[in-house]
Amino acid sequence: MRQKQKTYESDTDTQLELPGFELKREKWQESYNAQIGKKNSHIKNRSGIEIQPMYGPLDWNSKQYLDDLGFPGESPYTRGIYSTMHRGRKWSQRQLIGLGTPEDYNKRVRKLLDHGATAISLLPCNSGFRGVDCDEVPFQLLGTCGTVVNTVQHMDSALKGVPIDEISTAMNDPTPFTLLAFVLGTARRRGVPFESITGTSNQSDYISHYVANHMFYRLSQPGSRRVLVDHVAYCRKNVPNWNPVSVVGQHVQQAGATPAETMGFTLSTAIQYAEDCIERGMDPDTILPRFTFFFDISISFFEEIAKFRAGRRIWARIAKERLGAKDPRSWRFKFHGQTSGVDLTAQQPLNNIARVAVQASAGIFSGLQSLHTDSYDEAISCPTEEPARIAVATQNILREEAHLCDVIDPLGGSYYVEKLTNQMEEEILNVMDKIDQAGGMYQAVGDGLVQKMIGKSALAAQEKIEAKAEKIIGVNCYLEENSNVEQPEPYRPDAITMKAHVEKFKSFKSSRDQNKLDEALHSLRESAGDINQNIFEKVVEASSADATHGEIISILREELGFGHPMIIT
């Protein structure tokens, strides 16, 4: 079903208001054509929109100011979801961290908090993403690109000295959300009420995993759907300040989707989750204020800004007109941005500092609520300490020295930005129409439609790079055969420490109250077969009974099915 959209028209009366305008424009066009020749005659951005050499009053009708832009914190939300935006409410500096043992993580996160980070994020080890415990894989593979967290005890150590009732925590935590269960277990140990816990289930978007993040197949697609809705219901009742849904556009964009496709897929996924929750009987004004979004910010500067401005405008209409939300808080498009690791290169890695600064600036001008800046060595390894410090400092410099917070939506009213925002909106809505016609995002992914669209865009982008139509410094142009810049050493956790961590984990498992554990795991298994029970509630109870990450997932895989990669031809 076609989403309702404003009709955008150019200011056809401009020549009457500006005497001599048309004559001067034609004179410039003749001069431009004579000088430019055939080079750069047709430039398209990553979403396929042709970019003109110049924009002016014919490209955007300022008489539509209130319809197109309005004011920050008010419909149509193009200029931001809060009235003060960054001038009064700075974005959260949320650095994604994951390495080594819980103690290694704790040491790094406390340093970053000391250097200006205002919120934290935890990335688990790949073994955890795959749904197994640390004693099920060779210890040499553990902790190289994520922290080994398999129990409440591990989480308590990882967050030692971190005031979890004051600091927002993002858990990169696919279904069945064991990391949040471990955080809640830690809160119980410390006497912190669940109402004080704030943050986000950062990988709750199982659809994006089936599309583009193939290590996350913990549960079947139907099983993941059930657990997510249970997770939302539990959090709204028991952890009211937690964001249980983070709809992830990052995965599909890093897999090759264009920025416009990314926003279209992401909004379609949000519609799917909202409608699933509403079908369960939840009030849209109860769930939507806790929906958040997570996006990649590529180096296509103006395109990214237009993507987010258009997405914010579309979501407000969807929340009101399609989902029936009446509370203005439900219309807010709250998003976290991460500078794009896909744009970073292992060649000439120090160039990545400049790339990250450009990407971060685009995110800030877009009006994001939370930002992660990549370290310059992320194309090589898990971020090492000094590059991670520079990544945090990059945000500090943009905020404090470049004064990017002084003006709300400083590019608002730019002929180019407003025209491009309208064009991006049209492209995004075209993508969403295709998803609606396919039966919604759940069905479109199950049928392979979304995967095919991403694959086509990824191939086209790669062909442009190989043909040098898209230049990447240090990769296909401006090469340095004998560069004196040394690449940073990839991070590796201390082998002795990691081996000791695994041995301690084995001892912990053998010392548990087996009767209490068996009872909790039996209750978890029963909940999977009873739609009237909440699976996530049983996950929380099992973790508090010392069940491990792998044990919880193993039972749910048996009951709800294993998630298998889809072969798309």
Image (cartoon, rainbow, N blue to C red):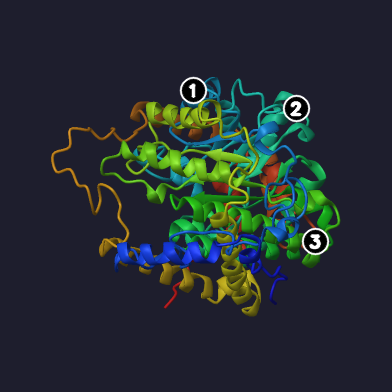
Q: Which of the 4 image quadrants contains residue 325?
A: bottom right
Relative to residue 266, is residue 387 depicted above or below? Answer: above
The residue beneath circle 1 is 107
Q: Which mark is residue 84?
A: none
What amino acid is at disc 3? Lys
Task: Give the left or right position of residue 325, taking residue 414 as reference.
Answer: right
Tell me the kind of residue under disc 2: Val
Observer-side mark, 1 or 3, equals: 3
* Total numbered circles: 3
Q: What secondary structure is marked by label 2?
A: loop
Residue depicted at 72% across the width and 60% down the height: 63
Expressed as whole percent of the image width and height from the top left, the position of residue 464 reads: 32, 65
Q: Which residue is located at x 79 percent, y 64 percent?
A: 323
Q: Tag 1's secondary structure? A: helix
Where is 317 relative to 523, above or below?
below
Residue 23 place in picture, x, y as percent: 50, 66
Q: Residue at x 70, y 26 (%)?
A: 166
Mark sitting earlier along the chain (2/1): 1
Indicate the secondary structure of the residue bearing disc 3: helix
What residue does disc 2 label? 192
Answer whether residue 30 is visible to the viewer in this image: yes
The residue identified by callout 3 is 320
Residue 156 placement, left or right of 137? right
- Ranked by sequence position, the earlier of labels 3 and 2 is 2
User: In this orientation, which residue lies closer to the viewer: 102 or 412?
Assistant: 412
The reply, left or right, for residue 385 in relation to residue 408 is left
